[in-house]
Amino acid sequence: LPPSLGATMRALRAHPSMALRKTFTAASGAMSTAITATTTVANVRPRRSALYMPGSNARALDKGRSLPCDVILFDCEDAVSPDDKVLARNQIAEALAAGGFGDRELVVRVNPLASPWGEDDVVAMAEAGAHAVLIAKAENQDEVNEVAALLHKTCRSRDEDKEMPDIWCMIETPLGVLRAAELASMHPVTCLVAGTSDLAADLRCDGEWQHRTALLPFLSHTVLAARAHGVAVLDGVHLNLQDDEGFEASCQQGRALGFDGKTLIHPKTIETANIAFAPSSEEVQQARRKIEAFAEAQAAGTALVVLGENGFSIDDTPRHPGCP
């Protein structure tokens, strides 16, 4: 896809209103840009900023209701000590049940099913109404199927019409990277999340050296897998909270690589991520002009339209479904 049309798609994806989502879906279908009947509204919602929040910190959970992030990643796993696992699960479930998080997407990183806490985590989050559960160190389809079956069983046991949470997969091991496309192809999976810290450790590389040079092939591979199967994809965290310039550069790099947003570990970084991964007002206006111009061209029976002084063209060339 031409870079300018890629910007058009980003501009529309980043706008949360239902009306614009419908416009995006219709226009994308008209332009044969891979938005198919299997693409859900969830896949085009904004995910510029996804803040990790330890479930054991009740004060942080409450503060999440007022933070301007698009996604809250409640954590039962890495950020919680073994002694606090049950406490974290219960507090997250209570917070979800209480509500008050507005339009934020509510995702819970659960412990592995093989651990003493994993199965209870998944059941509790399905019952509490999480939008998605995040599988840490995802590496194989069997694990995703097991989580999906447990979610389905839990939701159906409570209410035949209860919607099952989506499944997100963390790509943070070498095997996870190699199997990213397999995971992204699975029906319950709607998002891949790069886990750059653990991945760098497993690769024995310096993940921060020279603007993450050592990780770039693996980051791009994760984006490729997500785009090939029409799911969202989020960049990994930036650990140095004193390095504001480096964090902003990491956000800009992530957007340039094709990520939809960035995972965060502190509220002070939300604004920078929101700005970096949002379209400018000019991009939004240009996106609307392109949609209108192409609709007019189609109505006139023309397969190609040239827009503006820069000669930007939109054609009706078919593209493979699932590849924006």
Image (tube, helix red, strand yellow):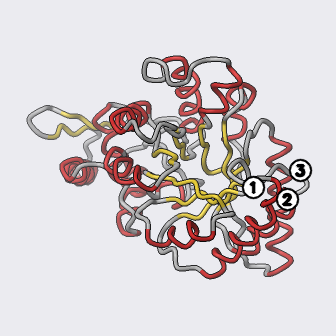
Q: Quadrant of the N terminus?
A: top left
Whole-number angstrom distance, CA of label 1 to CA of label 3: 10 Å
Q: Position of residue 324 (x, y in %)?
A: 46, 39
From the viewer's perspective, is the residue at label 2 or at label 1 nearer? 1
| Kind of residue sitting beneath label 2 | Ala
The correct choice, above or below, for 32 with respect to 162 in the image is: above
Q: Which element is circle 2 on?
A: helix
Q: Residue at x 44, y 60 (%)?
A: 69
Whole-number angstrom distance, CA of label 2 to CA of label 1: 15 Å
137 sits to left or right of 192:
right
Question: Crowdedness of circle 3 by 10 Å Cα count: few (<14), some, many (20+)?
Answer: few
Residue 110 numbered mark, or none: 1
Q: Residue at x 66, y 50 (%)?
A: 168
| Kind of residue sitting beneath label 1 | Val
| Kind of residue sitting beneath label 3 | Ser
Nearer-N-terminus badge (2/1):
1
153 sits to left or right of 110:
right
Q: Mark 2 points at which residue?
A: 149
